[in-house]
Amino acid sequence: MSEVSTLFDEEFLRKLEYLKLVANRMIPGHLRGEHRARKRGTGVEFSDYRPYVSGDDTKDVDWKAYLRLDKLILRIFDEEADLPIYFFVDASKSMAFGDPPKFDYARKVAAALGYIGLLNLDRVSVVGFSNGVSEQIAAKRGRNQIWRIFKFLDRMQMTGETSLERTFKTFFGTKRRRGLVVIASDFMDPDGYEPAFDFLRMFRHDVFNVQILTPEELKPQLPDEAMLIDSENGTSQRLRMSPTLIAAYEAEMEKLKTGIESYCSRYGWGYVQTQTPIPFEDLIIRIFKQDRFIR
């Protein structure tokens, strides 16, 4: 453990063991890898048909059905397969805010959920992003991989502005398997979240969003006049902090939350909002209770 920073200290490891027990209690059989993941492509047992969608592999098209129906139909097979989980950790400069910083919180969330995924024999990838993919480790499985993930997250550096859409287009631009995408971010993207979410939905990924904020971001306590500095691009502006201005800001933050929540609800995705003073293990249990991360 000495090779890893104090971010993943002995106390963190004890909490991971506690979370493992909680997961095993809440979803019996989960941590023994007793799950089946549906995978498009060749398999051991035919399962179903579905319409062809642009981007699907044409080798799975049922051409006999096409001749009969004049429609492209894809064959689906069931097979024992590990579910790929892609963890995206926001490493943009805005994540430095807070005590503890949002960035540290996001890394702990990714480490904890990654550990549960590895125990479930899933393949786990971790990606640091800002205005694109900044660094990543490839999909691996097996509980011993957690040390590799710890080291990677420990060395991850913050840089630049946030671009969710560019990140996902870069990462999924090369052919990758459909899987569960877990995003740990404040979602403060100048271009908004919808273009990125639409892209993930087009490729039929399952998505779980973890929005990490500080109490000050939700309810700012500022003097009557303050110099506000954008932590990502460095621009600044002196403003008079009137009650009207603060109320407008709080309304925008609520609009961001309800917008993400509504999008996720509409398409069956998971979403939680948390604040940095909340113990990360309490957040993980909330995620378990949603029954969307563990499948």
Image: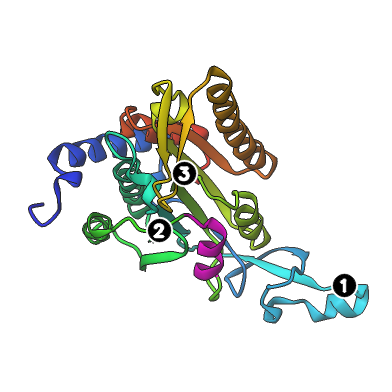
Residue extending furthest toward the left: 2
Residue at image point 76% right, 69% down: 52
Q: Nearer the viewer, residue 238 or 140?
A: 238
Boundaries of the magenta span: 162-172
Quarter of the figure with residue 67: bottom right
Q: Which residue is mark 2?
A: 160
Dominant secondary structure of the magenta stretch?
Answer: helix
Q: CA distance from mark 1 to mark 2?
A: 46 Å
Lower position in the chain sequence, tag 1 or tag 3: 1
Residue at image point 59% right, 36% down: 256
Residue 265: image x %, image y %?
Answer: 65, 38
Lower position in the chain sequence, tag 3 or tag 2: 2
Helix, strand or loop at label 3? It is: loop
Q: Please tell me how crowded label 2 is: few (under 14), some (14-19), or many (20+) other residues with Cα within 10 Å.
A: some
- The answer to if 16 sits in the magenta stretch is no
**Which of label 1 and label 2 is nearer to you?**
2
Q: CA distance from mark 1 to mark 3?
A: 35 Å
Helix, strand or loop at label 1? It is: loop
Residue 62: image x %, image y %?
Answer: 77, 76
Q: Is residue 91 above or below residue 169?
A: above
